[in-house]
Structures are given as C-alpha cells and as structure tokens.
Amino acid sequence: MMHEDIEEVLIAEEQLRAKVVELGEQITRDYQGKNLLLLGTLKGAVPFIADLARYIHLPLEIDYMAVASYGDATRSSGIVRIIKDLEGPINQKHVLIIEDIIDSGLTLHYLMDMLKRRNPLSLRICALLDKVRERDKQIALDYIGFSIPDRFVVGYGLDYAQRYRNLPYIGILKPSVYQETIDPRSEHRSPAEFQSRERVE
Ligand code: IMP
Ligand code: MG
C-alpha cells in the first residue's frame, strides 16, 4: 500500500532486492582474498548495508560513520561535521563506502578526502542511488544501484525531516509535503530555521 505523502513509487521492493543481490555478487567477486571493511553512513544507508552485507559471501567487517552537513531541508552544503567516527584505523583494510544516495556529491567528497589521509589499502564507493544532475564535485562511483532523476525521494533509509526511512520502497515525496513545512505561516517552524539547520545524513 502506498503512503499518502508519496507521489509515485520510483523503485519497488522487488527491484531493490534484485539490485542488492546483483551488487552483492559483484562485490563478492571483486574482493576475493581481501580484508574488506564495509563503511556505512548513518543513518540513511542502514537498510541498504544490512541487506547488501547478506549477499556478500566473504569474511568482512562493518563499521559506521555519522556525518551531518549544513543545508536546507532538501539540499546539502558540503560543510560536514563528524558525529561518529570509525572504531579503528583503516590502513590494513580495503574500504568500501556504502552510501544511500549521491546528490551534489559534496558530502562524499569531503568524506573521501578525510579517509584517504588515513591510507586505506583501497577506497571505493557503492551508492544505491545516483541522482542525475550537474555535480559541484565530480565523484567516481564504483558501484551504482540506480540512476534516478533529480527529484526528492524517500524510503529504504532515506528521510525527509527524519521521517519515511521505514518505507520498504523508494518513492518520490509529494512536493506539497515540504512546501507545507516551510510555510512561514506555520506555527512551529520558520523558513530561516529550516534553511540553516544541521542535518544528519
Ligand atoms: P550531497 O552532499 O548533496 O551528495 O548529499 C547527500 C546526502 O543528502 C545523502 O546522503 C542524503 O542524506 C541527502 N539527500 C540527498 N538527496 C536526497 C533525497 O532525494 N532524499 C533524501 N535525502 C537526500
Ligand atoms: Mg546519507
């Protein structure tokens, strides 16, 4: 059943599952004999990494990083703050970043720079969704689930104002939902408050 705030289901549950299996097989082939660390970004990539890890048939470790970036409700700014770091060093590990979505690429660009300085054996990116748009920062994505149009999507980990992460599919959010939230007549939230707020990915 489709949620009332969703305009259209972009990627259904079965399509997500099939893609996760395919990516898992590819990663299994590519990382044979390597000391693999899956690095999930909190919170958006949690459902994806949990599903994907079960289709990677290799010994591996999982760790998480939480970053927050300044931006408005639907766009990030590239100014990133680390809220939770990795537990240990990565210089003996092949690191594969597992991301939910690449939009401007600013968040990931910052993260990659920082991780490279820790000298991992290799550093690659697996993103479930790649938004097709002009990028401020060019990023080479090693594994991509789906290329999607430049629309605001939620579900399967992705949120709007921390909601909708639990939807089992990826859906396009009705624009009226976020237009309502930043309505200046709204009692609780002013547009300025929304525009300058820090957002946990
Ligand atoms: P970037 O720095 O613009 O690439 O921002 C990436 C982050 O912004 C993602 O990890 C998401 O947390 C968030 N984001 C970007 N686009 C969407 C979207 O369509 N829906 C939900 N979150 C998004
Ligand atoms: Mg994210």
Image: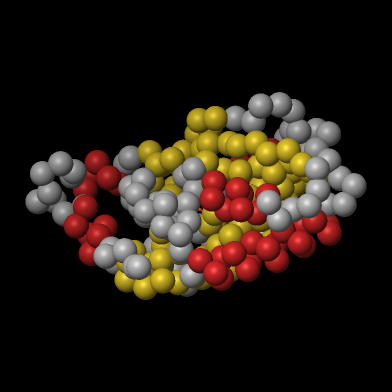
Q: How is the image coloured?
A: secondary structure
Image coords of residue 126 (percent x, y):
66, 55
At x 9%, y 51%, the residue is 185
Quarter of the image where the N terminus is located: bottom left
Q: Is residue 113 visible?
A: no
At x 83%, y 34%, the residue is 92
Image coords of residue 16 (percent x, y):
56, 65
Nearest the camera: 56 or 163?
56
At x 21%, y 52%, the residue is 182
At x 56%, y 70%, the residue is 15
Q: Is residue 62 above or below residue 125?
A: above
Name which quarter of the figure residue 183 lies in.
bottom left
Left or right: 145, with 150 as reference point: right
Image coords of residue 52 (percent x, y):
65, 54
Q: Which residue appears farthest toward the right when viewing the image?
A: 33
Q: Is residue 38 above or below residue 57?
A: above
Image coords of residue 180 (percent x, y):
19, 57
Q: Which residue appears farthest toward the top when viewing the image?
A: 88
Q: Is residue 165 visible?
A: yes
Nearest the camera: 179 or 191?
179
Q: Which residue appears farthest toward the front when viewing the image?
A: 1
Name which quarter of the figure residue 150 lies in.
bottom left
